[in-house]
Amino acid sequence: MVALHNRDSYVSELVDHGVSVIVPAYNEEGNIRKLYEELVDVLCPLRLPWELIFSDDGSTDGTWQVITELAEEDPRISGIRLSRNFGHQRALLAGLRCARGAAIVSMDADLQHPPPAISGLVAEWRNGNKIVKTVRIDSADTSTLKRLTSRWYYRLFTWLSGVPLQPGMADFRLLDRAVLDHILRFPEEGLFLRGIVEWVGYRSATVAYECRDRFTGSTKYSVKKMVRFAWEGISSFSIVPLRLAAFVGFVASGMSFFAVVYAMYVKVVAGHAVPGWTSSVAIVAFLFGILFVILGLLGEYVGRILLEVRRRPRFLVSESLGIDESVATKLRALE
């Protein structure tokens, strides 16, 4: 059982120069305690006050029970439990809103983000960097498909949004309190944190790390979730797809116009109709296909507008542990 001799003094030091670690978790019962043990081994030698906040994203296993046990054993542990599974980004955002430290580290609960790397993040922060990002070094057994899709996506995102993202970036990073306060003011519903962190600027550094194997359990990111996450990132940051759709529509309309002019010319000058009924049908079908793709793209953006206009809470907190009343009140106000 860990005891704090003066909790108020500890919290004051935490706010001034301490470190908050935020861990979103969904069905990570077998990983929570192991992660805590490794984090204690890393954070204590830093000689800084620290806190560890778990954000339970509506887990259906014993994740919340393990967090509760840890909070009873160590007052530096806090936890919030969302009313249902809202998704990784929203669970992460909920945890970030509870952070009190001068530096805030976010990482996953499966131990693929190695806790020892936090020492390097804090060292760069002490050197004056307001944002310390991490870049994953793929292991030898990482599939070629995963490497290529990651590289292609980040290049596509950078080209469409103008915000540079390096392949291998994730939500394992350190943010200075000033940067986080700015980010928490962003009102949009679909908050793509990886892009937002790059967009805000500030002096930054990058630390490379080798991705570990998951300690227990299986990944919660299916292909469907990954595709959805990728599209939300692009659509929340860029309207270039809409401009491309308009350009494609303009080109297709121009092709159709010249085809009509050519048909009229052949009819008037040559005295016969343009042959090729099949080709005409194929062209019409092709143009209609483009039209429906553009309409679908427009529908996606209109849907995002609808989500923003509704102004529904990004998440709902059903329980909390070790969260000061002032923080809990702020959290409820900013849901």
Image (cartoon, helix red, strand yellow):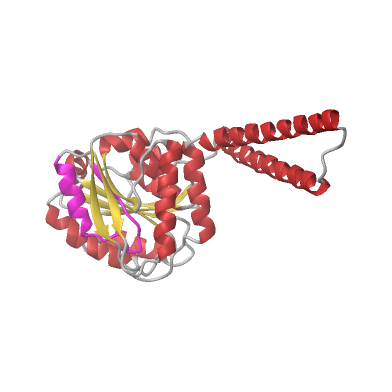
Query: Toward the viewer: 318 or 186?
Result: 186
Measuring from the top left, give residue 175's x and y in whole percent: 27, 42
Residue at x-position 64% and y-position 31%: 250
Dividing the picture into quadrants, the one containing residue 269 is top right
Looking at the image, is 90 positioned above or below residue 139? above
- How many numbered circles does the render carry? 0
Q: Quadrant of the N terminus?
A: bottom left
Task: Say above or below: 15 vs 149.
Answer: above
Q: Is residue 27 magenta?
A: no
In the rendered view, tell whether residue 195 sits above or below residue 47.
Answer: above
Q: Is residue 233 above or below residue 168?
A: above
Is residue 264 left or right of 190 when viewed as pictured? right
The answer to whether residue 119 is magenta is: yes
Residue at image position (18%, 59%) is 42
Asked if residue 95 lies left or right of residue 303, the reply is left
Residue 53 percent across, percent down from the top left: 32, 52
